[in-house]
Amino acid sequence: MTDPREILAAKVNELKEQFLAQLPVFLLEIDSAWSGGCGRIDAQDHLQAAYRLLHRLSGSGGTLGLPEVSTAARAAELKVRGLIEQERAPDATERAAIASDLLVLRRVVAGMRGGEQPEPAQASETALAPKPAGGRRKRVLVVEDIAEQRDILIAALSSAGWDVSAASDGLDGIRAAFSDRPDLVISDVMMPGLSGYHLCRFLKSSPQHARTPIILLTALEEQLDRFWGGRCGADRFRAKSEGFGKLLADARTLLEAPAPAPEAGVSLSLARGLVGEQVAVLMDQLLRESTLRAEIAGLGRHAEQLPGFLDAALGLLGQLFSVDAVAISMQFDAACTAAAAGESETERERISCELHAALGEQAAAPIAKRIDWLSQAAGAQPAEALGDAMTARLGSPPTVLGSLGAWRRCGRPAFTAAEARLFAQFAEQLSDIAAVAWSNEAITRKNRELLELHAMKDRLSELLVHDVKNAAWSVALTIDLLAANPSSSESLRRVLGRAQQGCKLLMDMVVNLLDIAKMEEAAVTLRPGPIDLAGLAREIVSLNRDVAAKRGLELAVGELPAAYGDADFVRRVLSNLVANAVKHTARGRVAIDSEPARQAGAAAHQLVVSVRDTGDGIPATLQERLFHKFTQSEERRPGADQAEGLPVDRGLGLYFCRLAIEAHGGRIWVESVPGAGSAFRFTVPVDEASFRLLQQERARAAVA
């Protein structure tokens, strides 16, 4: 028997017979371990033992061509694995489910022993790799903790013409990888101690084996296992149940790829203790990387404000590295500043140059610089000249946000390559949060600019309004003098009367603007007192009677009891509402009336005053924003022009009404149905006690 495939088939059959002979012993050991894992204090130890035995059966069953054994064992294996990961004993339902799986496994084994023997393995039709005519044969390292699986993998790979070495656990696998320098590593995943994931991550993280191909081989076919296999750097991930064909094909593909050049000065013989030291070094490196990620992620809570973020980032940078000075520059301020007590101007300029160089030509005028000095001796101030430096960019071209720098004094050891790599990682990971802080700062500054422009506009408007008010007073005084002259003709008096009306409208608009500005800043002072609502209503009706008569409108005043508040503000509110009603009503009537406010449990008593009209109504879309600043109706009402003595609507009247009523602690709203008229309503306190209660509630709401 010289055919390698026949030799492999014979080896598989031999191992299969040995495995079948051991199955009853395995079942007894599984039963013993499982019974000990159900509720005992040391349940986890027994569950671990049961899991290892089930894992052996599921893996070896798949490798040796016993799919029934593999499937039955794997069903129980996955359930026990879940208990181990959760570190708990099984409950009654889980005990029943796993007992059922073990019963199925026993029946499968009993069936094989009772005559249902599996078919003997035949010579594989998989093409084997031709043995090279000369030169070094490819070397494959097998890392497998289960003996029969290790033996059959050695036989399969050897029959393919490759030199095969083996290790029984992850730590020995790492040692063998450094001593044997294999061209390919095939490793089981689930092993005691270091798993296949750990081995793969360690080898891929070392310069010597970063490009050595690795195949992870496991009895598990869960998507999660494949995910972690890819994340730890494995080149292939194969389930043992897939047979040798795909495994040998993967191995051939990876071995035929160009071999990586060997690293110079690499020791080819490592003791197990030295491998343990290297594993510890790798674990330290991974710990540093994970800690760095976690600490930088913690800076996110400072990203709302750029100064706080820069201070926190500098503090973290100073903790991570043994440095004498650290600096962060971000492109926001025009000048380069250095906060360094006791330092010379020359050294500050030197740091500025370092930061300019780190940013490149794009930072001809770097903007935001923060420099924080750290001294190794508590309380000492840096005095000597700075020596070795590390610099890195924040962001990447074309979006460079700033730069990062760290310095040591002259005479101190230079930064190592490991420190430089960690510094680069720090800058790379910091860039994402720096971008958020930069964006927040940009938004904050833009908002500040807009607020300043808005405040400047308000100041200019206020000055303009005051100037217009003074000019309007002068014009009104001149018109009054002319109208009072007994020699003025009747036609001149009519013209002067219209001029007086125009001046009054202008003065009302000016006063409204001034009061609106004060109320927006909560600087208005009310002059509260009793209000004769009936008298105010009659006065306003009298002022609007001529215009209403020309339009054929009836003006009516209903029952209006006394109220309490600023009489002038309430008068102007009523005047605005009545004037609007007259302007937008073509026929019918405008009425002023009132009713008590219905507020269950309210301590303050209020009155609801209404101004009703029979006009065309207000569209629902306009009602929602009617009391906002500069809101105007999009439709012209019949006769709504200045020629008939009607005021021109500038979108400030109802806004003033809202502010004035809210200053009293009340509210204003409109009820309108298109085609059926409108009713504008507002509330005012009925007495002094109610007024004071409303003012107190308003003050509490402002504080909250």
Image: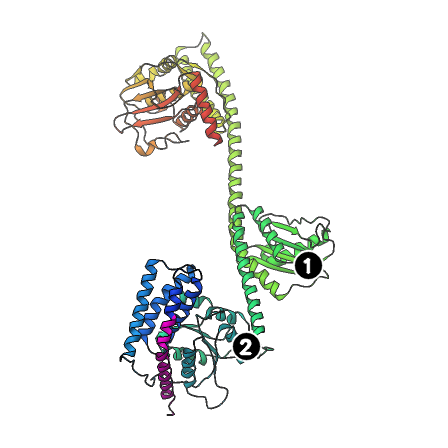
Within 10 Å of disc 1 (Cα), the crowding (few <14, some 14-19, many 20+) is: many
Tell which of 603 and 396 is nearer to you: 603
Circle 2: is it few (<14), some (14-19), or many (20+) Cα within 10 Å? some
Q: Which image quadrant: the N terminus?
A: bottom left
- Compared to residue 552, the image places residue 79 above or below, namely below
Q: Choose between 680 and 129: the one closer to the eye.
A: 129
Q: Residue at x 27, y 79 (%)?
A: 116
The answer to whether residue 603 is magenta is no
Q: Position of residue 92 (x, y in %)?
A: 33, 58
Q: Is residue 281 above or below residue 480?
A: below
SS for callout 2? helix
Q: Earlier in the sequence, mark 2 or mark 1?
A: 2
| Percent of width and height locating residue 565 | 44, 18
Rendered residue at 33%/27% (across/down): 670
Q: Residue 408's mark?
A: 1
Residue on which disc 2 sits: 178
Residue 424 in the image: x percent, y percent? 57, 61
User: What is the magenta segment's predominant secondary structure?
Assistant: helix
Q: Please provide the residue range marked out in magenta.
A: 1-29
Give the number of the mark in front: 2 or 1. Answer: 2
Up the image or down, 369 lies above or below 286; here it is above
Quarter location, residue 82: bottom left
Inspect this view and state whether residue 360 appears. Answer: no
At 35% from the left and 66% from the top, the residue drawn is: 76
* 400 with respect to 605 (left or right): right
Q: Quadrant of residue 191?
A: bottom left
Q: Position of residue 649 (x, y in %)?
A: 38, 27
Q: Nearer the viewer, residue 12 or 689?
A: 12
Give amino acid for label 1. Answer: Arg
How far is mark 2 from mark 1, CA to CA?
37 Å
| Residue type (three-letter) at the residue carrying disc 2 | Phe
Q: Is residue 124 left or right of residue 701?
A: left
